[in-house]
Amino acid sequence: VNIHITDKQLGALIKDPMFIAPRFPFIAGGFSEGSPAKNAGIQQGDKLIAVNDSSLAFFDQFKSTLEKHKNQTVAVTVLRDGVTKNIEVPLTENGKLGIYPASYDQYFEFETKNYGFIAAIPAGITKGVQTLKDYLKQFKLIFNSETEAYKEVGGFMRIGSIFPGSWNWQAFWNLTAFLSIMLAFLNILPIPALDGGHVTFLLYEMVTGRKPSDKFLEYAQIAGLIILFSLILYANGNDIYQFIIKGFMK
């Protein structure tokens, strides 16, 4: 399904990826230790459909509704083997049932494609080109004042946070390849001190037949380094700011 969103909505999505999120029914996939729901008789696989006779279709609706009944006993209606049952459940002080929702994987069809050594080469090139196209779209957002994507620019801390907490070779190499593509693109930007800047000066020399003066090249290199160091300071400073703000909010 293609959903059109405005630049302002896109900015909200960048700040909170759950701004646009799929909604799923609440099916009991497991229970926490000492779960009041399990003790009350709710079983794994039960589909929760109502609280206190108020019909609720999605998991997020249960979450917001139950928080209004902390430390209270509520009547939870479940659907089990085509039969509805009403079960009285005492909520925790946090308004929790002690239920883990079932994995969302059951709502999607997944297909695994295996590539041999030869077939993997064009497939890898195709994926690399698509990744570069996606990055260019993201890069343009930084200069859009409505999305405010520049506020989400990060440095070393942000890069480290996108890697999984436990070892996953596929995620690790995918992210490593993405960072390589990203750096390759940034390196060809026409900024002095980068390869793109050197290419720009060479093209100027080829077109005009004159080499820029050494003094000009010196000032250009200084300006390029100032731009690069400013970007580094801004990105990492933004990381520190976000870390402090989030820590304070917690």
Image (tube, rainbow, N blue to C red):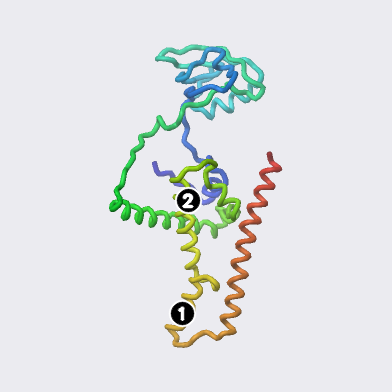
Of badges 2 and 1, nearer the viewer stands 2
Mark 1 lies on a secondary structure that is: helix
Q: Please tell me which residue lies in front, 163 or 73.
A: 163
> What residue is shown at x 64% (from left), y 20% (from top)?
92
Number of on-image labels? 2
Residue 109, image x, y percentages: 35, 34
Amino acid found under the numbered disc labelled 2: Leu
Residue 194, image x, y percentages: 52, 70
Residue 229, which numbered label? none
Amino acid found under the numbered disc labelled 1: Leu
Q: Please tell me which residue lies in front, 155 or 83.
A: 155
Q: Dot 1 surroundings within 10 Å: few (below 14), some, or many (20 or more)?
A: some
The quarter of the picture where the N terminus appears is top left
**Image quadrant where residue 234 sits:** bottom right
The quarter of the picture where the C terminus appears is top right
Tell which circle, 2 or 1, labels the residue nearer the N-terminal end. Answer: 2
Does the CB distance between marks 2 and 1 fall below 8 Å? no
> What residue is shown at x 51% (from left), y 15% (from top)?
42
> What residue is shown at x 63% (from left), y 52% (from top)?
239
Q: Dot 2 surroundings within 10 Å: few (below 14), some, or many (20 or more)?
A: some
Query: In the rendered image, which residue does mark 1 sit on?
Result: 202
Q: Is residue 107 left or right of residue 183?
A: left
> What residue is shown at x 61% (from left), y 57% (from top)?
235
Whole-number angstrom distance, CA of label 2 to CA of label 1: 33 Å
**Image quadrant where residue 151 sits:** bottom right
Residue 150, image x, y percentages: 58, 56
Mark 2 lies on a secondary structure that is: helix
Residue 175, which numbered label? 2
